[in-house]
Amino acid sequence: MHHRTDFVRMEDSQAEDWQIIGGEFMQFAQKLPERIIRHLQLLEGDYGGFPIDRYAHSLQTATRALRDDRDEEYVCCALLHDIGDTLGSFNHPDIAAAILKPFVSEDNLWMVQHHGIFQGHYFFHHIGMDRDMREQFRGHPYFEKTAEFCALYDNPSFDKYAETFPIIEFEPMLRRLLAKPKNTIYKAALTDK
């Protein structure tokens, strides 16, 4: 059963209202992993001309990272790096970064947010763009990490014959990551939860 408050304007709300809202929020937040997995699965069957669909690409990228013993946060970033393709056709890295921002370190967040420009090194020249656009970030502390992510995991993960773990392999680590927000304006409100 879902409880509701009855105020019309937030400025009229009371502490008791926010106890109700907070309780509902926590139940909703606990289902975030399922919602993210369902959204990721929207990429299934979306080939966009690529050799494999975007869902398989995401799984394959994460598989490669896991096989290289990357930590769970990194593997989850690899899994979700292209989740924004469905809603952010022209800025998909920003969507993935927005989803991951409360849960990941600054370096992993930067890597996800900038991977599109770094991945462009492998194909921008074919579409009339500057393949070295990433050079504007040369010297940034996370430049090499992002270049490595693309070289080792994103770039080679279009292989229809490559080992690709199913989503169930990644669900436990995704659940652990999404259970502990590190960077949120609501951190003070969550400390007792």
Image: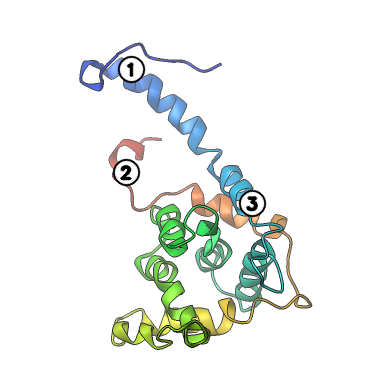
Q: CA distance from mark 2 to mark 1?
A: 19 Å
Q: Position of residue 123 (x, y in %)?
A: 52, 84
Most foreground residue, 49 or 144 = 49
Residue 36 horizontal side relative to residue 88, left or right: right
Q: Position of residue 84 (x, y in %)?
A: 50, 57
Q: Earlier along the polypeptide chain: callout 3 or callout 2? A: 3
At a point 44% along the width and 56% down the height, the residue shown is 95
Q: Earlier along the polypeptide chain: callout 1 or callout 3? A: 1
Q: Position of residue 90 (x, y in %)?
A: 44, 62
Q: Position of residue 22 (x, y in %)?
A: 39, 27
Amino acid type assigned to the residue bearing label 1 in the image: Asp
Q: Earlier along the polypeptide chain: callout 2 or callout 1? A: 1
Q: Quadrant of the N terminus?
A: top right
Most foreground residue, 14 or 7 = 7
Most foreground residue, 187 or 51 = 51
Q: Quadrant of the C terminus?
A: top left
Report which residue position mark 3 lands on: 42
Label 3 CA crowd tier, 10 Å (few <14, some 14–19, many 20+): some
Label 2 CA crowd tier, 10 Å (few <14, some 14–19, many 20+): few
Q: Is residue 95 above or below residue 133?
A: above
Q: Residue furthest top?
A: 6
Q: Nearer the viewer, mark 3 or mark 2?
A: 3
Report which residue position mark 2 lands on: 187
Report which residue position mark 1 lands on: 17
Q: Is residue 34 above or below residue 87?
A: above
Most foreground residue, 50 or 59 = 50
Give SS at disc 3. loop
Residue 124 horizontal side relative to residue 75, left or right: left
Amino acid type assigned to the residue bearing label 3 in the image: Leu
